[in-house]
Amino acid sequence: MKVLLAPGGLWPEPAGVPLAGSGPGLAPGHVASCLARGWREVRPHDSLTLLPMADGGPGSAQVIAPEQVASREVIQGRGPLGQVREVDLVRLLPKPTPFGNRRRGEASTWFLDAARLLALPADPDEAAQEALDGNTSGLGGVIGAALSRTGPLDTLLVGLSRSAVHDGGLGVMDALGGLRVAKDLLSRRSLGLVLADDIALGGMNGAGAALTRITSISPELAQELDRRACSRAMEVVSAAQGLDPGAVGPRRSLPVVSALDDVGPSASEHASNSAGNARLSASSWGTG
C-alpha cells in the first residue's frame, strides 16, 4: 500500500495559542519521521512518502524540499526586546514548463522564515514584558533586508506566528522608513504574510483581547494596549488609502485574503466601502 504522510508541527498550546519554536514540541519534519518510524514497525512493506507541511511558523523554511530551493541565506534580525535572532531567507526555483525546462527571467518567489523573531514565549511574565515594551521593528528590518534581495515582479512570503507584541504593525512600518517608503519598496513586487491563524488585530475576539490569556498582564491593561494599537493601525490604513487619491475600485481597497474563508468570515464579509470593495479594519479577520 502507498501512504502519504503530510503532517504539520505539534506544539504546546496554552490558551489555544501554539508555542511554535519555543523549544518544546516537534517541527513538521520531525513529526513526519516519527509517524513513519511507527508505521514501518507495524507495516514494513508499505511504501511511505513523507511530505511535512509548513504552517508559516518557525522552521517552515526547513520543510521546503531541497530540490525546490534556488538559494538560501541567513539574515540577522532583532526580537521584540532587541534580542539578536537569525532567520532563513529562501528563494524558490520556478516551476518547470510542460517541456521540463525553466523559463529564463521568470519572477521569483521568496520565503522569509521570520516567525522566530516574534514567537510567543512560554513564560507568561516574559510574554507580558514583550506586550508592554516590545515592538515589531525587528520584523520590519528583516522584511526590508529580504526585499532588497528581490527583483521586479518577485513575490516575498513572510512566515509569522502568534506573538505577545501588540503594536499594530507600527514597528514594521517605522523600520521600513514610513508608509510612502514602504510603498515604493513594494513597487512591482508582492508581499504576503503567512500565518496559520485568522485572528483579528482588535475586537472582542482579537489578538489584543487574547493578551490576558497568553500573558500575565491585567484585562484593563490589555484593553488599553489594544485601544492604542487599533487606533494607530487604523491611522496607517487611512493614510495608505490616501496615497493614491485618484485611484478607484480595488486599488483603493486593502483587503485581507484568507485561505480560511470556508471556516470563517473573510474581510469582504465584514467591511466594505460604498463600491462594495473589501476594506481593511482593525477587526478584519487575519489582521492579528
Image (cartoon, grey):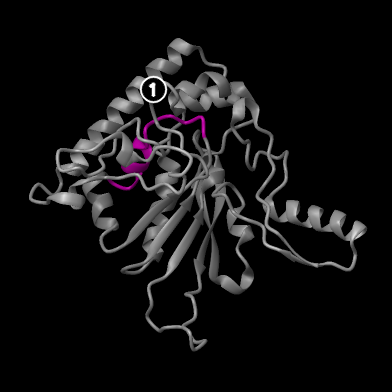
Q: Is residue 102 left or right of residue 213?
A: left
The quadrant in which residue 228 appears is top left
- Residue found 38% across the figure and 59% down from its top: 147
- Residue found 45% across the figure and 49% down from its top: 259
Decide which of 34, 226 is in the foreground and name it. 34
Q: On screen, 87 above or below 68?
A: above
Please state the horizontal and vertical placement of residue 227, each as a whole percent of the image.
34, 20
Q: Is residue 252 left or right of residue 162?
A: left
Q: Main secondary structure of the magenta part?
A: loop
The quadrant in which residue 222 appears is top left
Residue at the farthest left position: 246
Q: On screen, 41 above or below 100?
A: above
- Residue found 50% across the figure and 24% down from its top: 210
Q: Is residue 175 magenta?
A: yes
How busy is the neighbourhood of tag 1: few (under 14 within 10 Å), some, or many (20 plus)?
Answer: many
Decide which of 231, 116 is in the foreground and name it. 231
Q: Which residues are magenta?
A: 163-177
- Residue found 85% across the figure and 57% down from its top: 39
Q: Is residue 228 magenta?
A: no
Residue type, mark 1 in image: Asp
Please state the horizontal and vertical placement of residue 108, each as a whole percent of the image.
42, 70
Q: Quadrant of the C terminus?
A: top left
Residue designated by label 1: 226
Decide which of 248, 121 is in the foreground and name it. 248
Q: Secondary structure at mark 1?
A: helix
Q: Quadrant of the N terminus?
A: bottom right
Please state the horizontal and vertical placement of residue 67, each as a whole percent of the image.
61, 74
